[in-house]
């Protein structure tokens, strides 16, 4: 599945011999189609391999695609993930306060017009994001297809294959990280240095292993695909967490406090009882039943 997810991205030019796209937008749309095909293939393959009792099991539930407990699957993982970005959020707040202070020094006081301006700029940024093909990749297509393939399909297969819970949580992200090695040639051509490309991809692989372990943990603990999906989108939007800032030590303090809060709340906020009405009589892919 991991190999197919990457290989199909190159199929249009290498196998189908289609002409290279004439624009970045058409190039990305072609990749979106390939990623969608890969996801559907993985979902079908997974359904044929797993011991699904047709008529008794809801197929979408096998993959964690559910509407029940949806608000818990959005709010709790999002709150938990945001703790890792406590330093980043404090830094953004300080920058916002500095901007307001500068406006006051320049004689521009806070008024209804200025608030309306900020709201208008925020709405414009959202609308421009909706027409940005890179935004669609980062905040919709990549998170959705990657979570479907590397979490919803792979984790049930590994769990039903007899792997232990923690082995799955730490083993599954390896496939997720190796799928990012295809960027190596692209980075080497762009930078003109294999060493820089190896360092960039090495860092990316390390980061994806860490995030992949967290996303796998969320999926196994909650049995809900929405949980790792919202965490994935949020992390893509925020980028790497800010830990240290030259301007103030508050950012570092907030980062440490956020990390401690994250560790403290990791198991309570992912308790299977928060996301499932029944935690007994489960199938092999529902490992949360035995993980209290």
Image: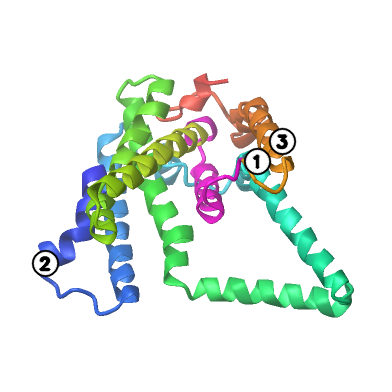
| Residue 50 place in picture, x, y as percent | 30, 34
Image vertical order of residue 93 relative to residue 163, above or below: below
Residue 44 seen by the camera: no
Q: What residue does disc 3 label?
A: 253
Residue where numbered disc 2 is placed: 16
Dot 2 or dot 1: first in sequence order is 2
Circle 1 sits on which residue? 76
In what element is the residue under mark 3? helix
Spatial CA distance of label 3 from label 1 is 23 Å
Verify whether residue 230 appears in magenta: yes
Q: Where is residue 129 in the image (x, y as percent from the top left)?
A: 53, 71
Front disc: 3 or 1 = 3
Q: What stretch is highlighted in magenta?
A: 219-243
Q: Where is residue 123 in the image (x, y as percent from the top left)?
A: 66, 74
Which sits in the foreground, 278 or 98? Answer: 98
Sooner in the amino-acid sequence: mark 3 or mark 2:
2
């Amino acid at each position: 599945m991991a190999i197919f997810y990457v290989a199909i991205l190159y199929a249009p030019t290498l196998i189908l011999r289609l002409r290279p796209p004439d624009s970045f937008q058409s190039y990305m749309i072609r990749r979106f189609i390939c990623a969608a095909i890969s996801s559907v293939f993985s979902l079908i393959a997974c359904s044929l391999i797993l011991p699904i009792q047709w008529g008794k099991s809801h197929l979408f539930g096998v993959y964690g695609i559910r509407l029940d407990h949806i608000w818990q699957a959005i709010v709790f993982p999002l709150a938990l993930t945001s703790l890792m970005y406590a330093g980043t959020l404090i830094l953004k707040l300080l920058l916002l306060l500095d901007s307001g202070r500068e406006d006051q020094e320049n004689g521009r006081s806070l008024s209804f017009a200025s608030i309306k301006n900020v709201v208008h700029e925020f709405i414009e940024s959202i609308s421009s994001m909706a027409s940005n093909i890179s935004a669609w990749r980062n905040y919709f297509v990549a998170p959705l297809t990657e979570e479907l393939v590397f979490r919803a399909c792979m984790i049930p297969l590994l769990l039903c294959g007899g792997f232990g819970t923690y082995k799955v949580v730490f083993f599954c992200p390896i496939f997720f990280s190796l799928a990012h090695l295809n960027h190596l040639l692209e980075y080497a051509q762009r930078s003109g240095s294999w060493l820089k490309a190896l360092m960039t991809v090495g860092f990316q692989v390390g980061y994806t292993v860490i995030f992949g372990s967290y996303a796998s943990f969320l999926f196994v603990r909650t049995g809900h695909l929405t949980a790792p999906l919202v965490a994935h989108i949020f992390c893509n939007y925020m980028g790497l967490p800010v830990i240290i800032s030259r301007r103030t030590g508050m950012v570092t303090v907030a980062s440490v406090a956020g990390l401690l809060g994250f560790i403290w709340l990791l198991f309570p906020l992912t308790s299977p009882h928060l996301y499932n009405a029944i935690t007994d009589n489960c199938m092999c892919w529902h490992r949360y039943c035995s993980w209290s």
